[in-house]
Amino acid sequence: MAYEVTIGIPVYNVEKYIRQTLECILGQTFESIEYVFCDDCGTDKSVAIIEEIKSQHPRGSDIRILRQPKNMGVGCARNRIVEEAKGRYLYFMDSDDMIAPNTIEVMYQNARKYEAEIVYGSMDKIFVYKGGEVFHYRSYPDVQFLKEDEFANYVFRKYDGIQGSTCNFLIDINVYSKYGLKYKPINYWEDFSFTFDLPTHVKRVVLLPDVTYFYMCRADTLSNYQERDIIAKDEILDTMMAINELKVGTDRLRGKPYFAKRCYKLMMTCFYICCTILRNETIIHPSFSRKEIRDLMKSPLTLVDTLRLKDRKIENLFLYMLGVIPAWLTVSCIRLLGKKKGLV
């Protein structure tokens, strides 16, 4: 059976939350949805709960459970869902989050109305581990981008231009195959290199002010470093490997009106990661050397390239220098600026 939309959800040890997630997606007002779960070989009862609801719910026949041969990480699970999705559009969400009852309906209507490749919705962030505080984590204006480079220009105009997560946007499934897009086989920031350059591949995009997603921020997730006793150095190195691929891909975008702004955003991401390393240096094992931190700040541009930029020249030049000056000075500068920004 063909569907208009696939909702894809990687699953790994979320038995405490998966029932609530299932209830909200099965209650969608839109009808033509398949629900694809990818079991990443967890050790709890998550999949058993899905199977139970599949056997009892009126929409149970629309649920499919894919099983990985072994635990391969959330990036590989997302790729598997992309490969097997039957929907015309794909919508990812995490297995412990929730969406509004009309999320798929409002996104699909806008995708069809504007012939959009992607529709983004706004979201609320709910701090479960702090007592349930809620705030607008990502609230978009009501706007449509329908011209070449228009959306990418909007995204790269400032550091925090668009969400870094692959959740809460409806995307034409053909975008993946057309541009050969895949998620990295890692567990933390597996979607960052995908979402970072996604705006450079698409033209017709819609942003919605409607809150369609509820991001449940919990203490026991990888995204919350501040709640952990030990951080493995390899986690951060995997993230940097994905970012280095973005650096290698910089040449592809030379001549684009957003080129300098993209370089700045990419290097500021490296800066923030360095701040995270310094803020958590007592719990990262093994530790990073000053040279390793300096090398994370290596720019994809040469000095000549940087001096030729017509936009963001001073900012890019400063970030370039952090990657070439003595390592002790790089670390000192990052520590000082990070403290001023409240990041270290």
Image (cartoon, helix red, strand yellow):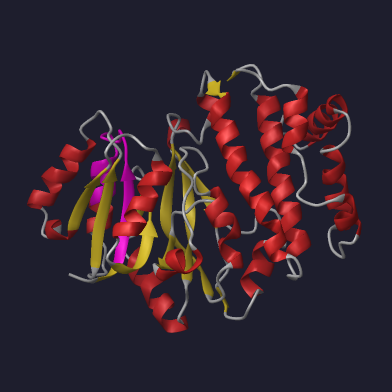
Residue 288: image location, x then y, percent: 68, 22
Residue 135: image location, x then y, percent: 52, 48
Residue 296 location, quadrant: top right
Q: Is 2 or 333 nearer to us in this picture? A: 2
Q: Where, quadrant-wise, is the N terminus in this rendering?
A: bottom left
Q: Is 340 or 280 nearer to us in this picture? A: 280
Q: Is residue 169 left or right of residue 24?
A: right
Residue 93 shows in the view: no
Residue 92: image location, x then y, percent: 38, 55
Which residue is situated farthest in the left direction here?
Answer: 56
Q: Residue at x 8, y 51 (%)?
A: 56
Residue 271 shows in the view: yes
Q: Residue at x 33, y 46 (%)?
A: 10
Residue 325: image location, x then y, percent: 89, 34
Residue range of the region highlighted in magenta in the rendering: 5-22
Q: Where, quadrant-wise, is the C terminus in this rendering?
A: top right
Residue 111 location, quadrant: bottom left
Q: Is 57 or 252 nearer to us in this picture? A: 252
Q: Residue at x 62, y 39 (%)?
A: 240
Look at the image and say whether residue 19 sits in the magenta stretch: yes
